Amino acid sequence: MLFSLSISAQDRLSKTKTSAEPLHHAQRVLTSVIVHDIFSPPVSARIYVYAHISAYEILVKENPAYRSLLGQIEDFPSIPNPDKTVSIELASVYAFLQTGKSLIFSEKLLNDSIPAVIGIYKKQLPSKIYQASLVYGETVSDIIIEWTKKDHYAETRKLKRYNFLKGEGKWVATPPVYMAAIEPNWRMMRPFALDSASQFMPLPPAAFSKEKGSEFYKLAHHVYTTRNNLTPEQTDIANFWDCNPFAVNVHGHINYATKKLSPGGHWLSIACIAARKINADIAKTSAAYTLTSIALFDGFISCWDEKFRSNLIRPESYINAYIDESWTPLLQTPPFPEYTSGHSVISTASATVLSSFFGNDFSFVDTSEMEYGYKARTFSSFQQACNEAAISRLYGGIHYMPAIEQGQIQGEKIGKLVLRKINLIKN
């Protein structure tokens, strides 16, 4: 049970109660470390979802309008109430950071940022409450961290290196560095809302053919001609939504990497932008972050399940073999199979969830990529943003249209399933 607060303690706690800025700050810090450590998009989504769940499950203790994930997600652990007077807000932010720290490589880098993130609480709270809040936050984080150990991630680390399948039309490694497959066994991960990785299996891709009159040749030629005739606006769109965590640049004999925001990081940045626009309190902000990160996590499971089932050749490989051997896409081709488009799946799933929180006609200015040198883009809705993210993969020269179209259908189904099965806001 919670101990009652003195009037002076209540006053000091109230000053920190509603602001979501410490949580936004924590999200940004975690994202910076994820970018630094070069985690793949699926693994980044895993880090985000557990960190945000840790924060959310503490915040529901003091926000009766919100519902715990207990009983809504299979095998979700019970989170105890604090046995001392605590700041729920501080405990939630600290739990977010502690959980995130357990899932990254550069722990010291994140540790160095923690004082700046939670400094406002240290200035405003009595020492006993401050320390008790950290202890409670770490207790909850430890529970969630223990729960992560059952999601099959460790098992996927022990599997043999992926061997490329042989045969025409199968995916092969692509220039410039011919990287190995990224997370070929991600379908094994424990989902949150999905019944199984294959629950929303899309229609099969077009049958492979190298004949000029075939449907597949036409799809590849469409990518080819689109790339060759890009407008400046289409080029800007492709670059803005690139979200390649590790792009390798080759100039003569010199190779260097460019680190960027992951697709999931971009959509959680959009969640931050939306929450800040309406000055959402920390509980609503955390709920939006949490449900979006769940949609992202399940989206990657569903998408990667299809990618390594259909194992479809990328446009770059096909075009070089059968249309133009010197052709290159605008964007670097990612190291995993083509079908379906990951951006299309996770962007549409995220947009579906965010629309439920902030409205179907929520306009915003997306500044997520400005620190990477790209101008902000303005959207009239989350749907418009996800549509642009999806088509950007055609402009970038890395996806055929069916992967984009079917990916958006797949993503919408995932987003709607998450909203149907996981209800964070009580009616």
Image: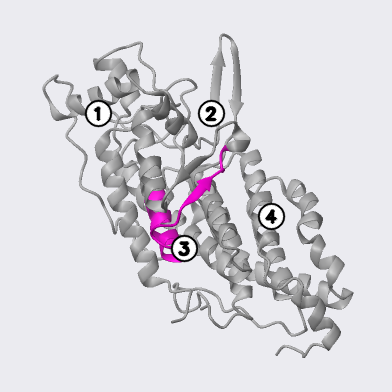
CB contact under 8 Å: marks 2 and 3? no
Q: Which residue is mark 4?
A: 25
Query: Does 177 sit above or below residue 80?
Result: above
Residue 400 percent coordinates (x, y): 28, 33
Tell me the CA gap for discs 3 and 4: 21 Å
Residue under the point 77% across and 90% down: 4
Could you tell me which secondary element the residue under label 4 belongs to? helix
Coloration of the structure image: one colour
Q: Hey, what amino acid is under mark 3?
A: Phe
User: What residue range appears in magenta?
Assistant: 346-369
Query: Does 209 sit above or below residue 363?
Result: above
What mark, if any, has residue 358 been given in the picture?
3
Q: Hey, what amino acid is under mark 4?
A: His
The mark nearer the N terminus, 3 or 4, is 4
Q: Hey, what amino acid is under mark 1?
A: Gly
Q: Which residue is mark 2?
A: 247
CB contact under 8 Å: marks 2 and 1? no
Tell me the CA gap for discs 3 and 1: 42 Å
Residue under the point 12% across and 26% down: 214
Name the mark nearer the viewer: 2 or 3. Answer: 3
- Circle 2 packing at 10 Å, graded few (<14), some (14-19), many (20+), is some
* Residue 21 appears left or right of 47: right
